[in-house]
Amino acid sequence: MTPQAKIGIIGGSGLYEIEGLEKVKEVKIATPFGEPSDKIILGRLEGIKCAFLARHGRGHRIIPAEINSRANIYAFKKLGVEQIIALSACGSLKEEIRPRDLVIPDQLFDRTKMRTSSFFTSGLVGHIGFAHPFCNKLSLHLYQAAKSLNLSVYLGGTYVCIEGPQFSTKAESAVNRLLGFSIIGMTALPEAKLAREAEICYAIVGLVTDYDVWKEEEHVTIETVLDNMKANVENVKKLIKTVLPKLERKRNCECATALKYAIITTKEKMDKKVYNNLKLLIGKYISL
């Protein structure tokens, strides 16, 4: 497939489309891992070709644990995407990070239980480095763009990803605070791991909607989440338009070559069906 866009945008709760896209078309992408969450919307924003996907599907019909992240990331790779800006509703675990603030984290902690988190499987084994789960350069561009818009934004901190769809208990929230985590959400994983396996730069903009349940005088409700999300959506749309023209076109970060030394299985022992499914990802390093 001819590359269609180098920039991908994944919309979370409350953001199911991007206004201002020009020359729009919708595409349905087939993948070896099933169907993506929805059709991908291609177009130009600020003159930049980009691809947009609603993570939960338009109409918000998919719970976090059942999002087909492998299909979503593979579809972006198939379209030629090299950088993904992911938007994620989240709760704050720190007093100073307030509802309606933006957080661009630099670390992840995985508390999910049921999700397939790798493209690799028996028959073809790979181990990527994941010490730095977000692309530092992409994250910095997002932070600088947010500051230029005078948005309340934090750079750095740990995003703890829970299974959901339920919110935390007070005990869980208290432990997450004791561990020093900054924000809590349900969708950063396995997206970030799969993006790294696909050698796609990935950064998250956390849209803070609440204080989780640790703050005595405030308790998270879906009404609170939706009200604060609506307030954040307009800021995020401005942020995306501002940052797109500033993104680097030639990458020299660790994301771009994450698979270079990751494949462990010897060629003669590789499962051909698995290899064919992953050829889009690993074909530049290994051919059968």
Image (tube, helix red, strand yellow):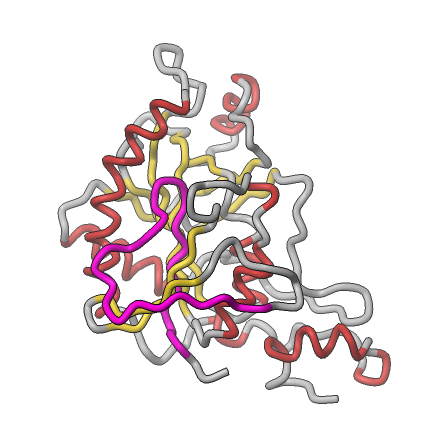
Q: Is residue 153 above or below residue 128?
A: above
Q: Is residue 277 above or below residue 187?
A: below
Front position in the image: 265 or 227: 227
For the image shown, how many numbered marks are present on the structure?
0
Which quarter of the rendering shows the C terminus? bottom right
| Residue span colored magenta | 4-30
Front position in the image: 194 or 31: 31
Tell whether position 124 is magenta.
no
Across and down, in percent, residue 73 comes to 53, 63
* Residue at 59% from the left image edge and 36% from the top image edge: 163
Q: Residue furthest top?
A: 217
Place residue 96 in its image quadrant: top left
* Residue at 47% from the left image edge and 37% from the top image edge: 185
Residue 60 left/right relative to 262: left
Q: Residue furthest right?
A: 269
Across and down, in percent, residue 26 comes to 40, 65
Place residue 244 in its image quadrant: bottom left
Across and down, in percent, residue 189 comes to 55, 48
Q: Is residue 249 above or below residue 235?
A: below
Front position in the image: 153 or 219: 219
Across and down, in percent, residue 117 comes to 64, 54
Residue 243 left/right relative to 178: left
